[in-house]
Amino acid sequence: EVDEEDDELVFTFDDLPLVFSCPRHWQADPAVDMIMQTWRMRERMKTVSVALVICLNVGVDPPDVTKTQPCARQECWVDPLSLNPQRALETIGGNLQRQYERWQPRARYRQSLDPTVEEVRRLATGLRRSAREERVLFHYNGHGVPRPTANGEIWVFNRSYTQYIPLSIYDLQSWMGSPSIYVYDCNNAGIIVDSFKNFAEQHEREYVEQVRAGGPQAGAAELPPPPSLRNCIQLAACSKDQLLPMNPDLPADLFTACLTTPIKVALRWFVMKNDLGHLAPQVKLEHLEKIPGQFGDRRTMLGELNWIFTAITDTIAWNTLPRDTFQKLFRQDLLVASLFRNFLLAERIMKSNDCTPVSQPKLPPTHQHPMWEAWDLAVDICLSQLKSILGE
């Protein structure tokens, strides 16, 4: 209609075209079942106990690997040859515990330094007993012992350190139970992942046979459930036919460093990769130790880098993994989520050194994801300002 006073067209609601006004749009369809999804996990879990098993035997290299000279030496950012063997071992164990405590400060930590089989058994069974139904983490550093065997054995020591003693993954599964997470930092670590699956299936078969035979024998305790492979997570430094990197500019425990000190490793690798300061002019490796700030304070350079790293690795995982896998690994357990975010960095850095980290559940390759370019840009911007910040 026309407003005679203002000589303008005036539209009423009835004159406007309507969309989605057919009967089918107004009637509820009982056949349509709306599925609501949320990024939050209802079934939360916590890693309450951590076993740190370190087999170094400082000063004695294992006989089955010929190391380059010079080669990678640092363990937990400590050169073990700079201290006497016992002091070096204790320092490395303490550093590793502090590195894990940053991600899960409330967990119960126990160190086992150059242990025997019996010491590992007591450690694992004790932590499982106290953890009950919660998750236990088993970290194994095998840099001072031979490579894992094809029979599914890792190595520890006898009491006098004169012999290497095999420890079967089959037994370790029995002691650790489930749910558990395992971290293997040793040569040919992928062998352990393959053996773990075979032994887990063997445990389940034996359990079924015992149940069919009438349960436990007279006077015996109730049968414990077999370790469920579905509830056990594994992170291995390399595949079954690979050796760890020996670049002397990188730590010997590069995989552990990526998992527990990701920002420090990422910055060091960035500077090395870019010809010691090609993209970030005049930034040397020694300058990286002076970056100001705290990881938990986003107002500082270190805190901002940590926040950006978390956002980028979460984004890579969200866009790469199946939804169920993402929820299980990145939203259920704070420590597991942190380790898997850092595992994405480990894959990128280890791949550049001819190593392929292995995980169970298996993840698709992410080392060439385009979001890593955003991380490189953020690092470059920060490092380009470092010289002026340190000069103030």
Image (spheres, rainbow, N blue to C red):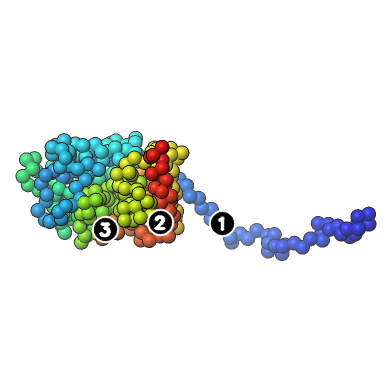
Tell me the residue at 21%/51% (across/down): 248
* Outermost residue toward the right in this view: 4
Q: Secondary structure at mark 3?
A: loop
- Which residue is under mark 3? 353
> Residue 135 appears in which quarter of the rendering?
top left
Let me know if residue 131 appears in the view.
no
Q: Residues within 10 Å of mark 3 (few under 14, many from 20)?
A: few
Residue 62 placement (x, y as % from top left):
11, 51
The vertical placement of 366 against 89, above or below, is: below
The correct choice, above or below, for 109 with respect to 311 in the image is above
At horizontal 63% and vertical 60% (from top left) the residue drawn is 29
Distance, label 2 to label 3, CA atoms, is: 17 Å
> Which residue does the image show at 82% across and 59% down from the upper left?
14
Picture coordinates of residue 165, whole percent (x, y): 10, 48
- Marks 2/3 in contact by CB < 8 Å: the verdict is no
Q: Which residue is mark 1?
A: 34
Q: Amino acid at mark 2?
A: Trp
Indicate the position of residue 122 as horizontal and vertical percent values.
18, 39
The residue to which callout 2 is attached is 372
